[in-house]
């Protein structure tokens, strides 16, 4: 028997992939595609319902009026939109500088045990339920003053800090070390390098992280339930109970009135649109380069 | 710039002949553009400020623990450990036992995991291993869009769309099939009236909410599995599914489990959507169709209305328990994910 014939015989003996294995392979591909479809169905359904039911009820009055008394038809969520703006403004004023500062610490000074502890704490804080954050804000603000926009802002700020610090760190670490060294070589002090060179190069990433945190807290309802409390009227005082859009959606949804159910859908649509458009606006501004370059 | 060592023809006053001594002494050094001592002080201040921001993160955790422990001590001293083991939540007679809420939280979260894990892992496997590259970006974008929807909107949708669907179609169907005595009827899980609002509804909406978390982490973990692992298994004659099972999933196990636990952490603390669909009943029922109550939803419903100190304290104690459980769960999850991605921060802040 020649060796060539031997090799030919061996090649012939490689068994074909059995039917069972081929069927399993195709079945698994099919199942994976099915899971994707199943996951996308609720997404499409939620956005579909929001658009259909929400668009039917959003009108000028809804955006410019305050709520009518229970049972009366009409009214709007203007005070909730403004109240949410106040709460988110306070949250951003407190949370963004602190978060970015913690991010700078982690990236520039935190390559040590203490930094690891802060990093881990931030990751763990990210998972603390928002309602627990609400309790803490209640204990440190409401118990000493009053139900207020300030208390809600403090609660949301506490949720923003861990997220922002971690994304800021990530973005600062992407800035090449050579850029920092070049700045030191020019005799620029370290603080100036960090602020004007490192942070500035990472601006668009940092802002994206801030917007992610903002979007996450903008729709939060649980920490506002017993901090800002809600309000049916206009209130621009930061130390008084304030209306908030997510709270209004929640209260309208669980009310017995059909007209309020309608308004809950409209409020939800407005909430989503406000979140998406604020993110889009900042992204656009960053792309335009008015905040520096990536 | 008025350095006397330099000869300036426009200043006739300086005559080198008359000032011979100047040439003997060494010329004073030009002023440095920046003195080292100038930079040190602001540098140090800046560093302290940044360190303070970093420490604020630690302080935040300490503050949360301090406030929760302080405000719940009254309840802890009154009821002790049996607070967590007894039923009966009676604000009027000031008797509090949190067991029904713990039961509801655990059951609804486990139900959510049972539904979400296969779907989330399937989506992750499809996006990393199977789908055409052009589809990969949009697909993961859409799945992560699910994570951007506020919890109250999930609740709204579930309340008006999912609940009628469950009570009219899904639950009767389940009762007719899985609920038959010959199949799973003996468990009692699928029996009883189809109310809509209940454990099943909570489990489903929680599953929808945690799928993006689990699947984005699973995707991240699958992507760090080295390419040569896949090639090696394929070279042994494996089909694609065998390659995924042996070469990819087995290597990414720890990270996927980490993602699942992270999803569990989110499900345990989820408030608004669950509060709107679980039915808020303190009775413990074996049936998944029956209403229940969770730790987070009792806080949402009663905290602002609690009048007595002991009621408030009992609620804070539930919050403390919830906090501790999520801390443990999240720490475990982070450690598992870190072992796979080697310390790179997992993007879980969605």
Image (cartoon, rainbow, N blue to C red):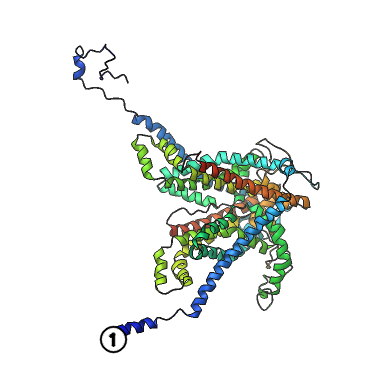
Label 1 is found on which chain of the structure? A
Looking at the image, is B337 positioned above or below residue A250?
below
Mark 1 highlights which residue? Answer: A2
Asked if residue B291 lies left or right of residue A71, the reply is left
Dot 1: element:
loop
Q: Position of residue B235 (x, y in %)?
A: 39, 72
Which quadrant of the structure image shows residue B13?
Answer: top left
- Viewer-proximal residue among B248 and B55: B248
Q: Where is residue A42 in the image (x, y as percent from the top left)?
A: 64, 60
Looking at the image, is B5 positioned above or below residue B338?
above
- The residue at the point 60 percent across, 48 percent down is A276
Q: In the picture, which quadrant includes the N terminus of chain B?
A: top left
Q: How many labels does the image show?
A: 1
- The residue at the point 50 percent across, 66 percent down is B130
Asked if residue B286 lies left or right of residue A192, the reply is right
Question: Is residue A218 visible to the viewer in this orientation of the structure?
Answer: yes
Asked if residue B291 lies left or right of residue A172, the reply is right
């Amino acid at each position: 028997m020649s060796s060539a014939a031997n090799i030919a015989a061996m090649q012939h003996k490689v068994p074909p992939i059995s039917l069972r294995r081929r069927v399993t392979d195709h079945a698994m591909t099919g199942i994976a595609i099915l899971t994707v479809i199943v996951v996308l169905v609720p997404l499409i359904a939620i956005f579909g319902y929001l658009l259909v039911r929400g668009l039917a009820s959003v009108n000028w009055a809804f955006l410019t009026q305050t709520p009518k008394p229970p049972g009366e038809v009409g009214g709007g969520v203007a005070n909730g939109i403004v109240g949410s703006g106040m709460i988110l403004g306070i949250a951003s004023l407190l949370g963004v500088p602190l978060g970015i500062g913690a991010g700078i610490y982690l990236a520039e000074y935190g390559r040590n045990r203490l930094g690891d502890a802060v990093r881990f704490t931030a990751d763990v804080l990210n998972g603390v339920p928002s309602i627990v954050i609400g309790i803490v804000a209640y204990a440190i603000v409401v118990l000493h003053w009053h139900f207020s926009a300030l208390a809600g802002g403090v609660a949301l700020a506490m949720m923003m800090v861990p997220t922002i610090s971690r994304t800021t760190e990530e973005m600062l670490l992407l800035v090449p070390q050579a850029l920092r060294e070049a700045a030191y070589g020019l005799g620029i002090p370290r603080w100036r390098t960090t602020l004007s060179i490192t942070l500035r190069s990472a601006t668009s990433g940092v802002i994206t992280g801030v917007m992610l945190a903002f979007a996450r807290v903008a729709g939060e309802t649980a920490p506002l339930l017993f901090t800002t409390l809600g309000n049916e009227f206009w209130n621009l005082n930061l130390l008084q109970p304030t209306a908030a859009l997510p709270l209004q959606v929640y209260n309208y949804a669980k009310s017995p009135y059909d007209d309020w159910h309608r308004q809950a859908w409209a409020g939800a649509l407005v909430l989503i649109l406000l979140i998406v458009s604020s993110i889009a606006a900042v992204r656009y501004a960053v792309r335009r380069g008015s905040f520096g370059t990536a | 710039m008025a350095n006397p060592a330099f000869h300036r023809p426009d200043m006739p006053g300086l005559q080198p002949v008359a000032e011979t001594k100047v040439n003997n002494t060494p010329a004073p050094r030009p002023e440095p553009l920046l003195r080292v001592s100038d930079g040190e002080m602001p540098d140090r201040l800046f560093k302290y400020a940044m360190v303070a921001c970093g420490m604020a993160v630690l302080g935040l955790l300490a503050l949360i623990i301090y406030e929760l422990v302080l405000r719940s001590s009254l309840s802890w001293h009154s009821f002790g450990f049996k607070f967590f083991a007894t039923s009966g939540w009676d604000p009027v007679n000031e008797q509090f036992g949190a067991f029904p809420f713990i039961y509801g939280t655990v059951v609804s979260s486990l139900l959510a995991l049972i539904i979400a894990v296969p779907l989330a892992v399937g989506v992750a496997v499809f996006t990393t291993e199977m789908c055409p590259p052009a589809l990969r970006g949009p697909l993961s974008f859409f799945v992560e869009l699910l994570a951007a929807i506020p919890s109250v909107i999930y609740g709204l949708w579930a309340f008006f769309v999912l609940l009628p669907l469950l009570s009219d179609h899904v639950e009767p169907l389940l009762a007719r099939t899985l609920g038959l005595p010959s199949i799973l009827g003996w468990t009692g899980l699928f029996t009883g009236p189809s109310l809509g609002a209940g454990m099943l509804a909570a489990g489903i909406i929680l599953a929808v909410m945690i799928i993006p978390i689990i699947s984005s982490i699973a995707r991240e973990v699958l992507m760090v599995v080295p390419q040569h692992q896949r090639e090696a298994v394929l070279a042994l004659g494996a089909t694609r599914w065998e390659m995924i099972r042996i070469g990819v999933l087995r290597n990414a196990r720890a990270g996927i489990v980490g993602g699942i636990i992270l999803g569990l952490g989110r499900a345990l603390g989820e408030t608004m959507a669950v509060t709107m669909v679980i039915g808020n009943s303190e009775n413990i029922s074996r049936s998944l169709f029956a209403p229940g109550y969770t730790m987070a939803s009792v806080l949402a419903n009663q905290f602002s209305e609690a009048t007595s100190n002991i009621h408030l304290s009992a609620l804070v104690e539930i919050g403390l328990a919830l906090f501790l459980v999520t801390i443990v769960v999240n720490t475990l999850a982070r450690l598992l994910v870190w072992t796979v991605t080697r310390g790179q921060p997992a993007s879980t802040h969605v």
